[in-house]
Each structure stands twice: as C-alpha cells, then as structure tokens.
Image (tube, grey):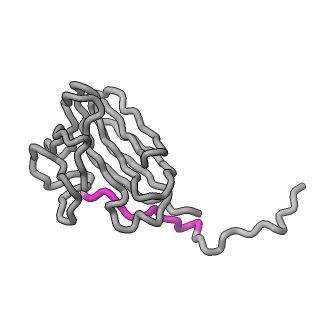
Amino acid sequence: YKNFANHHPNYDVDYLNLQEGPELFKNGTFSGVADTGSAVRGSVTSDQEYGPLLKIFGFVSQSIVNEKLRIGPNTVTNEGAIFKLSSVPGYADKSKFQISANYSGSGEIFITDGTYAEKIDLPHSATEIPITGSFNPPINSLTQIFFRTSLSKELYLDNISVKAIPDI
C-alpha cells in the first residue's frame, strides 16, 4: 500500500492537450523548390525557402532534386549539410527536440554541440523509409544537426521535420 497524499501533479500542464512545439525546419517537404546545384548557403538568411542549411567543411555536395534534399556523392567522408538549431527563433528556450524524415540511400543524422553527440544511422535502402528520433541535448547556441553520408555514397531526404518537445 502506497500513500499518494503528498503527490501533486503539475497544474500548469494540460496533460490531455499537450502539443509539440513549432516546426523548426522550414519547408522540409521542399515543395515548390526548383532543382538546385547547391542546397546550402554560406550564411543563414531569413529568405531561404527551406532549412536553413549550411555547408560542412565548405564542400558543396548538396542539392535539391525532385523536391528532395540530395547529399553526395561525396569526395570526402562525412560531407553534407548542417541545420543549426540556434538559427531558429524560439529554440533557445527548448531543451528537447524530435526529428523525423523519409530517406533513401545511406548516411546518418548526427546531432552535436561539440561535447554532446548522438546519431541516427541510416543503413542503405533502395526505397524511401521513415525515421524518427528524440533528443535531449544540452541547451546552447552550438547545437547542430548534420545530414551526411560517406565517400561515394548518396542520401536523399524528404519530409524533414524538427520540432521542439515541451518539458513536463
């Protein structure tokens, strides 16, 4: 027998109507985005149609093809695109986020702030399959999501979604 007389729920949380936070990755379906030679920019600007995405190591191996983000084929390992959570208004006060996407090809999604690191391996798939992961990195301005692949490999991503998860 347990006595729950001293247990009090958090009355500030509406548990029945708990909602995920806003979408942080802009236009993750790449709907209406024309095929491009480069899917990244040198810096984040507010007029970007999707993402925003930045280069990894300055190489350009990212493009938009048939309304999908294409990474590779690469001439170096771990090449791709970076999505900086700190570039999105409203993320600074969040500590958890969920990422989901559809992918084909092979690669990984790598989350880091320089100290904290986690990844989702994306083993080769000839057909598009969905993936989802939730992460709780330390809160700081260095948190980044890397979409990357290996030497001579290709990775296609669509329906990319990054959402804040409320703390309860």
Asked if 138 appears above or below 154 in the picture, the reply is below
Residue occupying image coordinates x 30% and y 33%: 78
Q: Name the main secondary structure of what is drawn in magenta.
A: loop
Q: Quadrant of the N terminus?
A: bottom right
Return the x and y of residue 99 as percentages of the image width and height.
Answer: 40, 49
Asked whether, in this view, residue 109 is left or right of residue 76, the answer is right
Q: Which residues are magenta?
A: 15-26
So how many labels did they put on this image? Answer: 0
Asked if 63 appears above or below 17 in the picture, the reply is above
The answer to which quarter of the image holds residue 31 is: bottom left
Return the x and y of residue 133 as percentages of the image width and height.
Answer: 45, 44
Residue occupying image coordinates x 37% and y 54%: 162
Q: In the image, is residue 16 part of the stretch drawn in magenta? A: yes
Camera sees residue 127: no
Return the x and y of residue 111 as percentages of the image width and height.
Answer: 41, 44
The answer to which quarter of the image holds residue 79 is: top left
Furthest residue toward bottom: 12
Front-most of residues 13 and 94: 94
Residue occupying image coordinates x 23% and y 31%: 154
Return the x and y of residue 139 as percentages of the image width and height.
Answer: 48, 58
Camera sees residue 160: yes
Q: Quadrant of the C terminus?
A: bottom right
Front-most of residues 72 and 66: 72
Front-most of residues 158 and 127: 158
